[in-house]
Image (cartoon, rainbow, N blue to C red):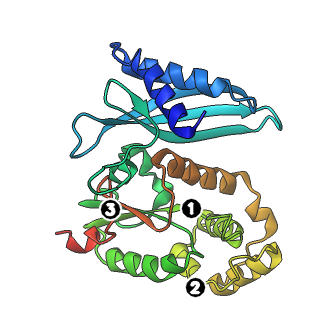
Amino acid sequence: MSLMLKLLAIILIVSSFLKADDLNQKVEQFLEDNFDTNPNIESIKVNIKEKIEIEGFKDWSAFVVGLDAVLKKDKRHVVQNMIWYSNGEVVTKELYDLKSGKNMSDLISMPFKDEYYKKENLIYGNENAKHKVAIFSDPLCPFCRQFVPEVINYMKKEPDKFAVYYYHFPLERIHPAAVELVKAAIALELQGRKDVILNLYKVEINPKERSNEKILAAFNKVMKSNINMADLISKEVSDQLKSDLKIVSELMVNGTPTMFFDGKIDKTKNRYKEAK
């Protein structure tokens, strides 16, 4: 069967029950039943976390679907969020605007919940400041290295205007060295050191470096610190990084730098300059 026929079959199957009152429950059950037929999955749980209206397309809604699965091969536990779309009649994984050619996912923004503004992520400003800015970044991302320090230095001068929250998002596949570098930064922050994030962007190391000794040497040289391997594997460091990456997953952040301004994603990355 061709891909087009498969997609049509899915749409026809789903349209048979999407007229029911409990749309969320029906979509959840349909997806769970279909993922359950995957021979690589031992068990899976599906739940709809958010329903988001798509601006300019009143008949369609986006559903943020959370998957919690265990793989058969290595019993690995996988937690992932996906977006599906429905107009109440059909459901589909991909949705495009015929006029612009844009994928509807470009118009979807996950809400930044109050619970994500954690004390440990506040690096500058007053938590009661007029504006809250959240930054997700990898310290070895080339654009981040130029952009993030500039943004932070701009906002740290006005602590009652900006509360700056920072979330570690090391892109392990392309910058493997960033993972240990981030762990070192968290360890140093836990020791009470200030301005760690700004100085983190001054560390010179090959993003592909995998030697922890070299990574730590470069980090300690800039920070004038003495972070060691034992610090990197501490539970406190692991818990903080897991917390940041969990928020990354829940917000479906997929690139760096990503910024949220007062709870909404800022794709321009310039709203802080326009803030009054």
Closer to the N terminus: mark 1 or mark 3?
1
Q: Which residue is mark 2?
A: 202
Q: Which mark is first along the chain, 3 or 2?
A: 2
3D distance between C-alphas at marks 2 and 1: 17 Å
Q: Which residue is mark 1?
A: 169
Q: Residue at x 68, y 80 (%)?
A: 219
Mark closer to the observer (2, 1): 1
| Disc 3 element | loop
Q: CA distance from mark 2 to mark 3?
A: 25 Å
Residue 47's spot in the image, x, y percent? Answer: 50, 27
In what quadrant of the picture does the N terminus appear?
top right
Locate residue 174, reporting x and y percent: 66, 69
Amino acid type at circle 3 is: Asp
Q: Which residue does the numbered mark 3 point to in the structure image?
A: 266
C-alpha distance separating marks 1 and 3: 17 Å
Lower position in the chain sequence, tag 2 or tag 1: 1
